[in-house]
Image: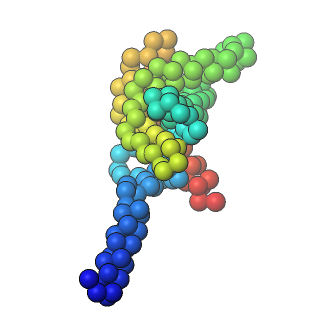
């Protein structure tokens, strides 16, 4: 074999190895952008969870998934608190009961959020070369409205208000998140 042929094979092997090393799945945009990575028309909450430094694959997956769900929980808490404040401001409440308003909001938000989280699903995962696992969870606004019917402990008025105003509250929350992510 001539020197040129050997050199050519060596160069091709090095190039092939370099291309192979660069291969593999591309890091998804949602890891850094969260919901900002999705430009779809559906109104969906997205949560991202991360688990690193955990040796057990099952525990790493569960941890990343739970953190993604917790991310959605925070968003739901903000949205439902806003909805409850709006609901109570539009409801005639006697002055003597106004003091209990904050506690009522807190309890209702917790009840609603805890129950709705059962509808959250993990829709994607990505593991990088270091073993860090990322999970993406989602909850569509239509699922949220359907689940509102099933939440025990909500009055019919609160339930109807959530269903009627969930989309506008989602839009406000998305707008606020966009402001913060643009900075």
13 left or right, relative to 168: left
Above or below for 42 versus 108: below
Residue drawn at the location 53% of the way across and 33% of the way down: 55
The quadrant of the rendering that contains the C terminus is: bottom right
Q: Residue furthest left?
A: 1
Relative to the observer, which residue lies in front, 79 or 84?
79
The image quadrant of residue 138 is top left
Residue drawn at the location 52% of the way across and 24% of the way down: 113
175 left or right, relative to 118: right
Residue 135 image point, x, y percent? 46, 40
Above or below for 148 versus 155: below
Relative to the observer, which residue lies in front, 181 or 145?
181
State how the image is colored.
rainbow
Residue drawn at the location 26% of the way across and 83% of the way down: 1
The image quadrant of residue 181 is bottom right
123 left or right, relative to 182: left
- Would residue 13 be seen by someone viewing this image from the given angle? yes
- Would residue 161 be seen by someone viewing this image from the given angle? no
Above or below for 146 versus 30: above
Relative to the observer, which residue lies in front, 79 or 48?
48
Residue 47 image point, x, y percent? 49, 40
Residue drawn at the location 46% of the way across and 32% of the way down: 57
Residue 133 image point, x, y percent? 49, 41
170 left or right, relative to 4: right
* Total count of labels: 0
Residue 94 image point, x, y percent? 66, 15
């Amino acid at each position: 074999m001539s020197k040129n042929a050997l050199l050519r094979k060596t160069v091709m092997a090095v190039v092939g190895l370099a291309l192979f090393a660069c291969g593999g799945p591309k890091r998804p945009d949602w890891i850094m952008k969260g919901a900002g990575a999705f430009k779809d028309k559906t109104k969906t909450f997205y949560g991202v969870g991360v688990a690193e430094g955990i040796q057990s694959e099952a525990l790493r997956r569960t941890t990343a998934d739970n953190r993604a769900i917790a991310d959605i929980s925070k968003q739901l808490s903000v949205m439902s608190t806003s909805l409850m404040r709006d609901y109570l401001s539009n409801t005639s409440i006697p002055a003597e009961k106004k003091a209990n308003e904050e506690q009522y909001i807190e309890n209702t938000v917790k009840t609603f959020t805890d129950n709705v989280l059962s509808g959250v699903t993990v829709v994607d995962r990505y593991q990088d070369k270091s073993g860090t696992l990322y999970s993406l969870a989602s909850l569509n606004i239509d699922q949220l409205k359907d689940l509102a019917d099933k939440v025990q402990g909500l009055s019919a008025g609160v339930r109807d208000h959530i269903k009627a105003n969930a989309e506008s509250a989602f839009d406000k929350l998305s707008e606020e998140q966009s402001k913060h992510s643009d900075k």
